[in-house]
Amino acid sequence: EEAVEIAKIAVACPSAKAGNACDRSFLDPYTLGSALAAQEKAEEALAQYEACIAMNSNYLPAYEQAIQLTQAQGNHARALELCQAAIALHPKSSIIRTQAFVMADLKQETEAPEAL
């Protein structure tokens, strides 16, 4: 609980909107999302990971966590969208493998092997 409260304060901090090249404020919603996920508050955690992605669309860990949560919720179409966005930025083997599993969940088995 304390970690969530601290992270919420960081997210609300006005300096988080500095917008400079060294700005790391996108990590605040990621941290809050991780704290919420640890408390099994998946919807709230997902909203924070997506806020992190909106702030820095190049931050792969936020995609990985959002993919995991959306897939666990059964929202395979959204998980696939997140996989494709992450792969476009970082063609990382673990994300490509996850995309193949999501495609299989969406009954796109014939296309899944091509994703690998």
Image (tube, rainbow, N blue to C red):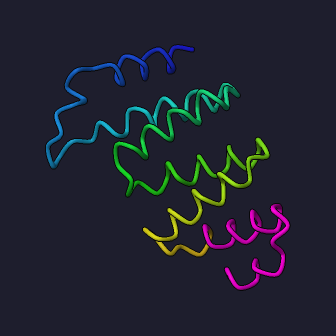
Residue nearest the viewer, comparing 112 with 68: 112
Spot occupied by residue 84 in the image (x, y as percentages of width and height): 56, 66
- Is 108 situated left or right of 46 in this image? right
Quadrant in which residue 26 is drawn: top left
Question: Hey, which residue is sitting farthest bottom in the picture?
Answer: 114
Residue 43, image quadrant: top right
Residue drawn at the location 50% of the way across and 62% of the way down:
85
Quadrant for the N terminus in the image: top right
- Residue 3 magenta: no
Question: Which residue is at a point 43% across and 33% down the rendered structure image?
Answer: 29
| Image quarter hosting the C terminus | bottom right
- x and y, in percent, of residue 64 in the image: 57, 54
User: In the figure, 95 relative to 75: above or below?
Assistant: below
Query: How many badges with numbers are in the image?
Result: 0
The answer to whether residue 89 is above or below residue 36 is below
Q: Position of residue 13 (x, y in %)?
A: 27, 20
Instruction: Give the extent of the magenta segment.
Output: 95-116
In this view, 103 is above or below 41: below
In this rendering, position of residue 101 left or right of residue 28: right
The residue that appears at 75% across and 80% down in the rendered structure is: 111
Magenta segment's dominant SS is helix
The x and y percentages for residue 92 are 53, 73
Depth order, front residue of 1/26 = 26
Q: Which residue occupies 68% across, 45% down?
A: 70
